[in-house]
Image (cartoon, rainbow, N blue to C red):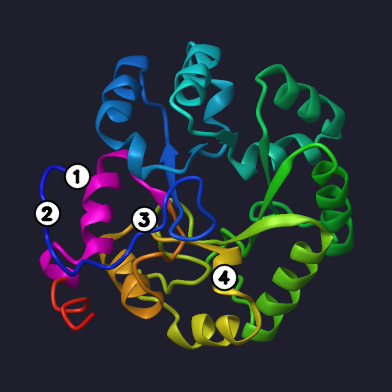
Amino acid sequence: MNYTINNLPERTEKPRESGYTMVMDKGLSLRQVEDFLEVASTYTDIVKLGWATSYVTPNLDQKIKMYQDAGIPVYFGGTLFEAMIVRGQFDDYCRIVDKYNLQHVEVSDGSITINHDVKCDYIKTLAKNFTVISEVGSKDVQKIFAPYKWIQLMKAELEAGSWKVIAEARESGNVGIYRDSGEVRQGLVDEILTQIPEQTIIWEAPQKAQQVWFIKLIGANVNLGNIAPADSIPLETLRLGIRSDTFDHFLGL
């Protein structure tokens, strides 16, 4: 840090298990990645190449290497996994992940319908060679799961070998754990936290109000995902209570 401010909440240090920030790259250029890394690599734990943008992104191998050289793991969004699974291309998917020397994979079913036991079998298979992040929840705003179902699915996926589970919200933050207005489904989150350890969950929170809500609920070291590159540093100031939205929250520490 550039100077001292007393009595800030203690942040975990990389590599960390909690206080995780997952940034979504939706198509940054190499120059933009370079600029992003210059200012935000310290505050970024992992980068997701959103949905299947990796299929159309120029200079993909160079981009991935830039992140990896900065010590930041990269993985392909879960929609790519789904797009290949639904076409019977699981082996091709594994070869692509190997080709780009990725250590993390995402297993999701937000856009397709798949038997949950089958999804867990994919998790078990991939966990033998990769760190698996699985996603629970649908991208379809009409599909609303009861809290007990979220808990059931998350438990099963963690038991199958997922390192962490993502609570679905899309990049827009208006499905899954949120209402279509972007408001948090508070009762759902509270129920999930009665059964699932908070350090095993990454809450997708692309909107500032959502980030603030989770920081106030769980603390500075809550795991948050789908963060825009430009929001990495602003999010860190929210975590530390040096931005108005969380300013009063940490003063009593």
The spot of residue 244 in percent (x, y) is 10, 68
Residue in view at x 14 percent, y 71 percent: 247
Secondary structure category for the residue under label 4: loop
Q: Main secondary structure of the magenta part?
A: helix
Which of marks 4 and 3 precedes in the sequence?
A: 4
Q: Marks 2 and 1, how far apart in space?
A: 7 Å
Direction from residue 69 to residue 247 in the image, left or right: left
Magenta region, residue range: 226-246
Provide the residue designation for mark 4: 142
Quadrant position of the C terminus in the picture: bottom left
Secondary structure category for the residue under label 1: loop
Direction from residue 119 to residue 146 in the image, left or right: left
Provide the residue designation for mark 3: 206
Provide the residue designation for mark 2: 4
- The mark closer to the camera, 3 or 2, is 2
The spot of residue 230 in percent (x, y) is 25, 40
